[in-house]
Amino acid sequence: MPRRVEAEQPESWAVRIALGVPTGWDNGSVRGTEYTDWLIEHCERCALEGPHGHPLTAPAFQVDQRDLEQLRQGVRRGLIELLPNGRFNTVDRPRPEGHWALLSFYGKQTILNGEYIPQLACYVDLIARLGYDPRRVLFEPGDSGCRLDHAVLDDTGHAVIVGEAKVDPAQPHDLAVRVTARYSAAPTGPVDRPARKGREHEAWKLADALWKMRPDYLWLVAPGKRQAYALRFDPLALTRVDDLPTASELGLTRVPPDMLTPAAHN
C-alpha cells in the first residue's frame, strides 16, 4: 500500500516530487509522472483551502497515467472544469458551485474520490476519441439513467452505450461475471436485491439498470481497465468486444441542437 502523507508535514507534494521524497503517488500507485503534477497541485491547493485545511491524503488506490492524460485533455478542451472548491463540472450539466465533488472533506482528512479519475477519462474518451457529440453524452445521468456513470443517447433518447466506473481494477471483470451468473435469465426486481451493499449489490444494481434501459453496449472501466461488451436481451448476455463502436459506426454523427435527455424506462 502507498505510504501516506502525514498531516504535520507542511511541504507541498510538488516540492516533495522535486526533492525526490516519497509522496504516496509513487510506489506503484501511479503509472508514470508526466501528467500527475498538475492534478496533485490542484487537489493539494483545494485541500489546504478547504473547510478543515488538511493536506490531501495520499491515495491508497491505483491512478493510471492514461486516465490522467485524458482527464487533462478534457480540461484543455473545455469538457471538464475543475473548480477551486474541490468540485468539478462536465459540459453536459454544469453548476456554478460545481456539480460533483472531486474531493471529500472530512474532520480528520481530505481525500480524492478516486473513482472519478477513470470515470472522467472515459467521459472524455467517448467524445474526443469515439466522436460522440457532447450533447449525446451524459455524465452520471442520475435516476433517469438508473444511476449509472455514463450514458450515450441516440436521437430518441435511448441509451445505446452505458458505462460504469470502479476504483478497483479487478471489479469490471467481477461485475461482468456476477451479472452473467445471476441476472441473465430474467429481469431483476426488489425481491432479488441483496440486503447489504457490496459486490453482490453492485451486480444487482448494474443488472437492474441494464434490464430497464436495454442499451446496446456496456463499458466497465477502472484504473488501467476498459472492458467493452455488446449486449443482447431475453436472456441477457454480455459479449466481450475489443472496443466500443464510434459515433460514425452507429450513425450518430448528427449534432443535436440541445442536450438530449434519456427516454423513460420501466
Image (cartoon, rainbow, N blue to C red):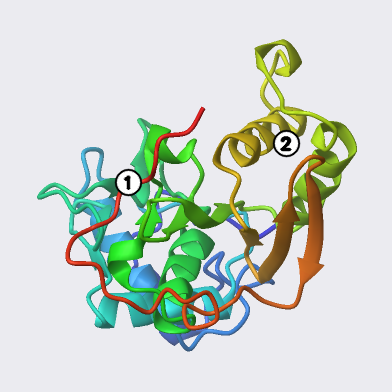
The image shows residue 144 at horizontal and vertical percentages of 39, 36
Q: Amino acid at mark 2?
A: Ala
In front here: 154 or 110?
Answer: 154
Which quarter of the figure is the N terminus placed in?
Answer: bottom right
**Left or right of residue 74: residue 211:** right
Q: Amino acid at mark 1?
A: His
**Left or right of residue 262: residue 33:** right
Residue ID at (47%, 70%) = 121
The image shows residue 43 at horizontal and vertical percentages of 33, 61
Q: Is residue 101 above or below residue 160?
A: above
Q: Secondary structure at mark 1?
A: loop
In front here: 124 or 190?
Answer: 190
| Callout 2 touching callout 1 (CB < 8 Å) | no
Q: Is residue 165 above or below residue 263?
A: below
The single residue placed furthest to the bottom in the displayed view is 34
Residue 194's label in the rendered image is none
In front here: 153 or 137?
Answer: 153
Tag 2 residue: 203
Tag 1 residue: 54
